[in-house]
Image: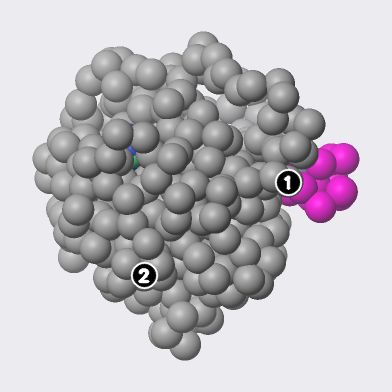
Amino acid sequence: MKAAVLNEQPGGLDIEDVVIDNPGPGEVLLRVMGAGLCHSDLHYMEGIFRSKLPAVLGHESAGIVEAIGEGVSYCKPGDHVICCLSIFCGQCKQCLSGHPYRCSNPAATSRPKGAPSRLRRHDGTPIDQFARLGGFAEMMLVHQNALVKVTNDMPLDRAALIGCGITTGMGAVFRTAKVPPGASVCVIGAGGIGLAAIQAARIAGAVQVIVVDVSDEKLEVARQLGGTHVVNASKVDNVVEAVKELSDGGVEYSFEAIGLKATAEQAFNMLGVGGTATVIGMVPPKQVLEIRGIDLLAEKKLQGSMMGSNQFRTDMPAMVSMYLDGRLKLDEMVSARLSLEEINEGYAAMKRGEVTRQVITFD
Ligand SMILES: NC(=O)c1ccc[n+]([C@@H]2O[C@H](COP(=O)([O-])OP(=O)(O)OC[C@H]3O[C@@H](n4cnc5c(N)ncnc54)[C@H](O)[C@@H]3O)[C@@H](O)[C@H]2O)c1
Ligand SMILES: [Zn+2]
Ligand SMILES: [Zn+2]
């Protein structure tokens, strides 16, 4: 099968013909129908985060079950599914205390040490699956606990976006920060993740959703999806002051959806008394963030969010319902459909900041 392989860091993706194994115990083989381009893969292509190599990147996918391995009880061939990298064992303390996205026992949902790799080259060289998914490929072989079934009337190219970006952005609002009705919110970064957070803030009943980005086109999409005010960071002297002015001294909830020191610090500094800043963006591993200690006396909080603190087997079907009833806008978020061969151009366009979400389709 065809797959997009990262062979060096930094580096682009090579389209290669690779071998995918048959499903082993607990595993499911899927035909991929949609694979979204998330900025996280780009961080690995740029070498800002380290990855095992060679690796098939991609972690925002939806598809149709082709075959199941021994002991798979959750799904059957023909089922439509979304993948999620928050693969849960269901038995560790994190899973059992309501935090399956923080599962501490990945060995329980991986092949045993020494077993053949799920993906390999024709010469036998093992190929890693990024996030134990490897979604930039025609087929995927994953553990059944990486999947959620969805109704057949959900278009699978848009279902793919729920696999990471939508769940991450909406989950940060609903689950990590728990934004209540009536809140004032600011979202910094209106890419795939930020637009999902903006939509969740609208659905949660936030009265003010200020959006900060450097692109007027992104800010226009953000307005259509729920932004009530926009700030172009490249056109104001001081983003924090601009947001404070719009929000009567500071917002109650801020979300950073880029992954930079400057914008993560802006998210904290734009809070009003008692406010909570949630950093969703992947800040480089060695980057230190600075905040003023005195702000803690004003009960301002800075927190992270991993995959929207999701419980994806229940959250994703709810997001599908919100798409089907018109509340969650996904059609408007897809700025391009690409073939697998066009993936490097897609990432170049993301780097230039030209696109909202792009999705690879396989027809
Ligand atoms: N925490 C998690 O679990 C998780 C999950 C998925 C993605 N992420 C991370 O979220 C971040 C966003 O991902 P994405 O796919 O939405 O990226 P994206 O590239 O689609 O969007 C980033 C947006 O930020 C804007 N931007 C860039 N610099 C800016 C600045 N200085 N001020 C204001 N706006 C600026 C860009 O114009 C763009 O609209 C990435 O760091 C990604 O790795 C985290
Ligand atoms: Zn992602
Ligand atoms: Zn677990």
- Ligand 3, seen in the image, is in the quarter at top right
Q: How is the image coloured?
A: one colour
Q: Is residue 48 above or below residue 196?
A: above
Query: For this rendering, which residue is in front, 136 or 285?
Result: 285
Q: Which mark is residue 339?
A: none
Q: Amino acid at mark 1?
A: Gly
Percent coordinates x, y for residue 86 in the rendering: 61, 46
- The crowd level at tag 2 (other Cα within 10 Å; few <14, some 14-19, many 20+) is many
Percent coordinates x, y for residue 50 in the rendering: 44, 17
Q: Is residue 115 above or below residue 306?
A: above
Res 239 → quadrant: top left
Percent coordinates x, y for residue 315 in the rendering: 62, 66
Percent coordinates x, y for residue 340 in the rendering: 19, 48
Tell me where the magenta segment starts and ends, as one range: 90-102
Residue positioned 49% across, 47% down in the render: 244
> Judging from the image, what secondary structure is the residue with disc 2 in?
helix
Q: In this rendering, would 301 be left or right of 4?
A: right
The residue wearing badge 2 is 225
Res 104 → quadrant: top right
Query: For this rendering, which residue is in front, 280 or 33?
Result: 280
Q: Quadrant of the C terminus?
A: bottom left
Q: Is residue 272 visible?
A: yes
Q: Amino acid at mark 2?
A: Leu
Q: Which mark is residue 274?
A: 1
